[in-house]
Image (tube, rainbow, N blue to C red):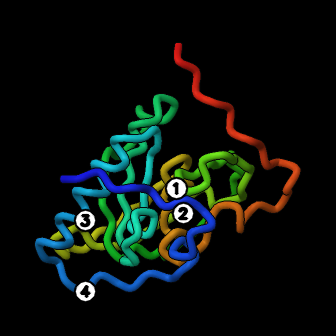
């Protein structure tokens, strides 16, 4: 299960709409494993296939990797061909992205969403999530449509350079 390089903006693949997954085969299982291994190698909570150069509708999230949200986490999830079918409420959230590692900004997202998807075997999934997981899923699903969080920033004044990680 190799770790793959994460594409960084302005790589044009990050702005492309991804194709639906149609084959639930060994190649998909390997891609899912690669997403997990890649995310485990960096500080982050989600990764979409286009961020590692594969233009397919697959995301991997693990909100438990954030100490602030671990208690309310659903744990690690792979979602194939995810679609948001319901949205409610609104929340502004400070977002960052592994493909735009220098920046964070406030983004307005739905507070609660319902997502339909498939797991890596093709079995149907339905998730009803709110708070951080809802924001995380919206962010990663956006990647599948070639949308980056900076495309959703309403107030450019909220954009900040990310503070370097301390070695403490």
Residue drawn at the location 35% of the way across and 41% of the way down: 41
CB within 8 Å, label 2 to label 1: yes
Provide the residue designation for mark 4: 22
> Disc 2 versus disc 1: distance between alpha carbons?
6 Å
Is 141 in front, or is 112? 141
User: Which x, y percent locates residue 137?
Assistant: 48, 59
Q: Under tag 3, what secondary structure? A: helix
Q: Residue at x 48, y 50 (%)?
A: 133
SS class, disc 1: helix
> Mark 2 or 4, which is nearer the eye?
4
Q: Which residue is mark 1?
A: 134
Question: Looking at the image, which residue is at 29% across and 51% down?
Answer: 3
| Residue 56 found in image quarter | bottom left
- Alpha carbon separation for disc pair 3 and 2: 21 Å
Q: Is residue 88 above or below residue 76?
A: below
Q: Which residue is mark 3?
A: 31
In-image side of 106 versus 21 (left or right):
right
Closer mark to the observer between disc 4 and disc 1: 4
Residue at which label 2 appears: 138
Q: Position of residue 84 (x, y in %)?
A: 49, 73
Q: Residues within 10 Å of mark 4 (few under 14, many from 20)?
A: few
Q: Nearer the viewer, mark 2 or mark 1?
A: 2
Residue at x 85%, y 57% (from the top left corner) = 155
């Amino acid at each position: 299960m190799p770790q793959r390089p994460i594409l960084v903006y302005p790589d044009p693949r990050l702005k492309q709409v991804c194709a639906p997954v149609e084959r639930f085969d060994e190649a998909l299982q390997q891609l899912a494993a690669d997403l997990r291994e890649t995310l485990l190698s960096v500080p982050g909570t989600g990764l979409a296939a286009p961020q590692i150069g594969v233009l397919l509708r697959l995301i991997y999230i693990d909100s438990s990797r954030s100490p602030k949200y671990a208690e309310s986490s659903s744990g690690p999830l792979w979602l194939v061909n995810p679609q948001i079918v319901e949205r409610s409420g609104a929340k502004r959230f400070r977002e960052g992205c592994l493909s735009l590692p220098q920046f964070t900004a406030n983004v307005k997202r739905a507070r609660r969403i319902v997502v339909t998807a498939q797991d890596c075997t093709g079995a149907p999934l339905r998730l009803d999530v709110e708070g951080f997981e809802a924001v995380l899923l919206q962010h990663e699903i956006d990647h599948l449509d070639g949308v980056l969080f900076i495309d959703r920033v309403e107030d450019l004044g909220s954009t900040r350079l990310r503070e370097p990680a301390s070695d403490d």
